[in-house]
Structure formats: C-alpha cells, structure tokens
Amino acid sequence: MRQSVMELRPDFGRIRKAAHHEEPDRVPLCEVLIAYSIQSEFLKREVKEDDLHAQVEFWAKAGYDYIPVPVSLMSPGKVTEESKITCLLREMVLRKNPGETNPTAWNLEHTSFIHDRKDLEEFPWEAAAEIDYSKLEKAGSLIRPGMKVIAVSGKIFTLTWMLMGFQDFSLKILTEPDFVQDVFQKVLRIRHCQGHLLYYDLQP
C-alpha cells in the first residue's frame, strides 16, 4: 500500500544504511537544495530563507530523513543576497567605496575579485573561514524525532572561478597555473575545515 504523507516518518537510519551498502526499509530521498517556491507550494504557505520552522516541516512532510543546512560561503544554487560570500564581498567593497549602492558590485555573478597575487593576499580568507553555527543549532532544536541535520558545504570549483572570473580563470590555467592552484588551495582549505561538520553528523 502506498504511504500517505502523514505516514512518512523520518528515520536517518535509512541514510546510514544506504551509505554502508545496506538495504533500508525504503529508498531514502536525498537532495541538497529545494527552492523555497517549491516548499511554499507543497506546504500551501510561504517559506522564506530565515523560516527554519517551515523548512523543517517541509523536509519532514515531503519524506526526507534530514534537513540540509548550508554552512559554506555559497549556498547550493543561485548566488543570493543572503549568501555568506555576498555579505563578505559587500563589506569588502563598501570599505573601499562607502558610496557604492549597486548590488552587482559585490555579486559574484557580475563581478570578480581575485586577479593577481595582491588580490589573493588581501582577500579576507580568515573571515571567510569563520562558521556561524547558529542556524545549525536552531535547526537541531526543531527537527522531528528520527531526523538529522546535515551541514552542506562545497562549491570548490565554482567559488574559485567565480572569484577570478571565468574568462580570467580559463586564461590563467594556461598562463599562470600555479596562481590558479593557489586560489584553489585557499578555497579548499575553507571547505576542508567546514567539511568536518558533515562527517561528524554522519557518524553512528
């Protein structure tokens, strides 16, 4: 018999079993991103980026055994205004030009920031590596019995070429491969540090 929405009770054990090549009671659903517009349509009410109550309700009712919470500089999908990288770059731009009001000046989809060694050295890497645990902690206090919170990190390739600009990135792969490698290493170190959160959350 087909399960109803009310019967889809979370059980993170399904994810563990699948990860260890064991057979769970059903195939676990897995996503790292579902648009808020889709969540809103599913719940028949608006779901926003800062509404964790509604997000937990969606992931539980839709049949998922966890809720993904981004902890990286860039969330999965589009570069948004609330992304950490956007906030970081906005502060950087406004320190140099306090009168700037055009949001494209700090949006990675429109502007690049690392073009030479000086840019690489002056980029605020320490601030970029800081992790805000508050959303993880709040989500952990809201999840349903059987659910877990998975910290979502990544965007190593995407963040590297976006910081450099794709054209400059492509050219420097040929002309300055060591420089491109160093930018990759900076981004990778941030992701490696944050990746321990995901590893920890998957432990038995």
Image (spheres, rainbow, N blue to C red):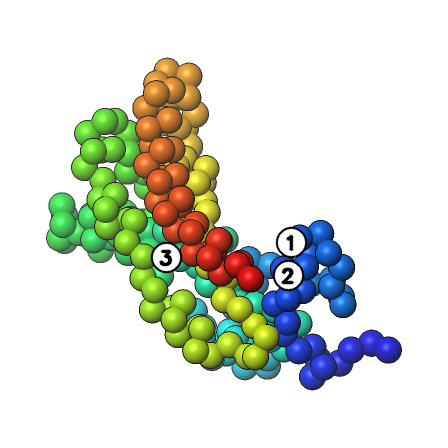
- Residue occupying the point 32% across, 36% down: 186
Inter-mark Cα distance, 2 to 3: 27 Å
Other residues around mark 3 within 10 Å, as few (<14) / some (14–19) / many (≥20)? some
Disc ID at residue 147: none
Asked whether residue 139 is in view, the answer is: yes
- On the image, numbered disc 2 is attached to which residue? 15
Inter-mark Cα distance, 1 to 3: 29 Å
Q: Position of residue 86 (x, y in %)?
A: 32, 53
Inter-mark Cα distance, 1 to 2: 6 Å
Asked which quadrant contains residue 177, the reply is top left
Q: Position of residue 18 (x, y in %)?
A: 69, 56
Pointer 2 or 3: first along the chain: 2
Q: Nearer the viewer, mark 2 or mark 3?
A: 2
CB under 8 Å between discs 1 and 2: yes
- On the image, numbered disc 3 is attached to which residue? 83
Of helix, strand and loop, which one carries label 1? helix
Nearer-the-camera pick, 69 or 81: 69
In the image as oriented, which residue stretches furthest toward the bottom?
6
Other residues around mark 1 within 10 Å, as few (<14) / some (14–19) / many (≥20)? few
Q: From what the image shows, is residue 173 above or below residue 63?
A: above
- On the image, numbered disc 1 is attached to which residue? 19
Q: Position of residue 193 (x, y in %)?
A: 36, 47
Of helix, strand and loop, which one carries label 3? loop
Asked whether residue 41 is in view, the answer is: no
Is the N terminus in the top left, top right, bottom left or bottom right quadrant? bottom right
Q: Position of residue 41 (x, y in %)?
A: 60, 75
Nearer-the-camera pick, 17 or 178: 17
Give amino acid for label 3: Ser
